[in-house]
Amino acid sequence: MRVLSPSARMKVALLGRSAFEPHVPRTAEWAELRFFSLGEDGGATATAADEARTWGAEACLIFEPQRLGEDVVARLPGMKIGIVPAPLEDFESFAKLSTLTRPGGSGLRWLTWPESPVPAELASLPWLQTLPLPVDTRRFTEGPRLQRTGILVPEWASPAPAVLERIREQLPVELLPRGLEPSALQERLEGAGVLLYSSGEPLGRNDPLPMLALSRGLLLIADTAFPADWYVEPEDEFLVRSGEAMVRAVDALMRRPGSFHAVRVRAWQKVRETFDASALFQRLLHDASLMSAVEERGPTGPSTG
């Protein structure tokens, strides 16, 4: 098994729904990359698998692998790594992952989970590492547009109506509807300065929007934090506020527009340093190749020191 070196260029296919395109590098120095859309209903999965094989992919990274059938996974070429972008909680998805990673060359070789720990029911599967859903930061090279203070609020994660009404009295608020195409969502993020987000679960756990907002240099004001092992720091890189405290944060932004510039800049830098898709996928494939080579040699193989 070849270990991926910094100078190697391999063909890497990335497969998933169109919503994952902002998380896929368009280009990389270390590989030829191509995104194959699986379609929202799974109807294009077999076609995408055949296209990846025809293209000559040497490795396949599959977002939401539990959506695929065994026959589709078997048709994919090269090393196959399933990327689970959000925690799974139902028995059906657990069973599907177990089926797709059965021993043999036709199934998934490795899996990633977005946070730790992996559920006990899945502990026996071939987990390679914890991998939060990354962001293709090269699509957005311009630094934070700190002069922008327009507020975005997702309809599915909106603060309480009374809180939102008070905020509307201070600054314009634009509601984000569900189901926006990646290009439309990008346009909204590029034109705004703040994301208000209210949720009962850790940020980014089931929704990539908070991380996408940080990658564009928006000020994120939320009532919960990111998973602890993602190391996105409250107060340094985003604000944790709820209810009246969220209103006061917006009021401070209106009265002193430069109040949170440092927070926005640190968040923008953190995403580039820690969540860049190109760097994370390169490391993922390197580690997968290395671990596969170690397993193939077995316990009596030569030591790597």
Image (tube, rainbow, N blue to C red):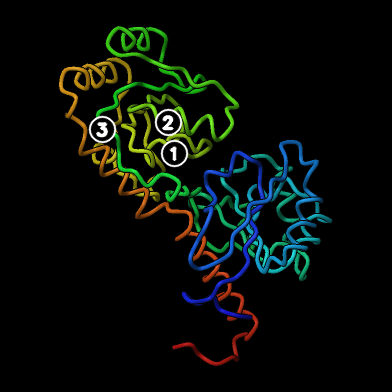
Q: CA distance from mark 3 to mark 1?
A: 16 Å
**Percent position of residue 128, x then y:** 56, 64
Disc 3 versus disc 1: nearer the observer: 3
x then y, percent, for residue 62:
65, 54
Q: Amino acid at mark 3?
A: Leu
Kindly identify the residue that appears in the image at 44 percent across and 39 percent down: 212
**Nearer to the camera, 253 or 53:** 53
Q: Which residue is mark 1?
A: 212
Q: How many marks?
A: 3
Question: For the residue marked with disc 1, what is the amino acid?
Answer: Leu
Q: In the rendered image, which residue does mark 2 sit on?
A: 189
Amino acid tagged 2? Leu
Could you tell which of marks 3 and 1 lies nearer the N-terminus? 3
The disc label shown at residue 302, or none: none
In the rendering, at what x and y percent does residue 117 appear? Answer: 50, 52
Q: On the picture, is 154 further left or further right than 163?
A: right
Helix or strand or loop: what does disc 1 sit on? helix
Q: Residue furthest right?
A: 71
The answer to which of 234 and 55 lies nearer the viewer is 55
Whether residue 285 is situated above or below residue 63 in the rendered picture: below
